[in-house]
Image (spheres, helix red, strand yellow):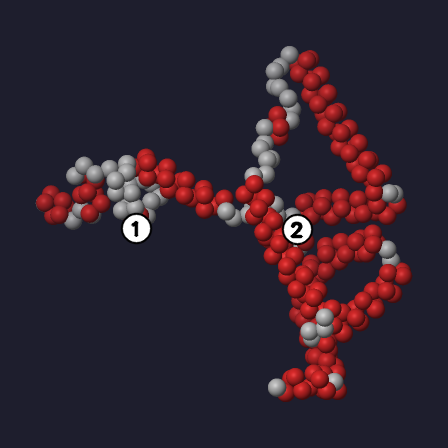
Amino acid sequence: MAEPSAATQSPSVSSSSSGAEPSAPGGSGGSSGACPAMGAKSCGSSCADSFVSSSSSQPVSLFSTSQVHDLIFWRDVKKTGFVFGTTLIVLLSLAAFSVISVVSYLILALLSVTIGFRVYKSVIQAVQKSEEGHPFKAYLDVDITLSSEAFHNYMNAAMVHINRALKLVIRLFLVEDLVDSLKLAVFMWLMTYVGAVFNGITLLILAELLVFSVPIVYEKYKTQIDHYVGIARDQTKSIIEKIQAKLPGLAKKKAE
């Protein structure tokens, strides 16, 4: 009865029992012949090096899209409230004081907290005769250096957006599409009235209020908002079609 069980053993068990070294954990079956002349340790180190080199070419973003989405949709109320309150206080301070004053007060407040905590921990350690060390040692040991490769990756990503913006500006100002250029002209004309009422800081405050309020309201009343937005889109589309029909150049181009 022992012979049938031995005959049904898997090929991997037979090969391992014949003296071959077992494959590294997590390795796939397709990579068994990738390093035929190398040992398991050398193959593992070379695979790790190739993984690091391939992953280092990807730029590391400070904030992912999901984190920003969760922030503006108030998934974590405490975190969103802290970010919203802090930025709103900074913007209100900039509206009342100069930039130099706001930055100076912020740095003084931060230094007051860190110096006070450092002195407090030193006194506690002296009273208790403990040797806990510097209270911010864990943060001081963090490596925050930016490698040249990461810097170039960030610059390349920024250049893509800059080149796209330059092409858009050239297309609008050199009137490649007359309707798009007219849209920009109307928008800038409306912004002259906005600028006469609000300044830049006020617009930033309003923008922050909209960013932290509109998404959550839209998520709650999505069906009703989409209905009215669809009606407004249809009306706008019909008006644009009427304007294009009255402009001979655009009508001819559309017909071609």
Q: Position of residue 135 (x, y in %)?
A: 65, 24
Camera-nearest residue between 67 and 128? 67
What residue is disc 1 on? 30
Alpha carbon separation for disc pair 2 and 1: 42 Å
Q: Residue at x 72, y 56 (%)?
A: 211
Q: Is residue 153 above or below residue 180?
A: above
Q: Is residue 233 above or below residue 82?
A: below
Which amino acid type is shown beneath numbered disc 2? Leu
Q: Residue at x 88, y 43 (%)?
A: 97
Q: Is residue 219 visible?
A: no
Q: Earlier in the sequence, mark 2 or mark 1?
A: 1
Q: Residue at x 59, y 44 (%)?
A: 151
Crowding at mark 2 (Cα within 10 Å: few <14, some 14-19, many 20+): some
Q: Position of residue 193 (x, y in %)?
A: 87, 65
What residue is disc 2 on? 71
- For the image shown, how many numbered marks are present on the structure? 2
Q: Position of residue 186 (x, y in %)?
A: 80, 71
Which amino acid type is shown beneath numbered disc 1? Gly
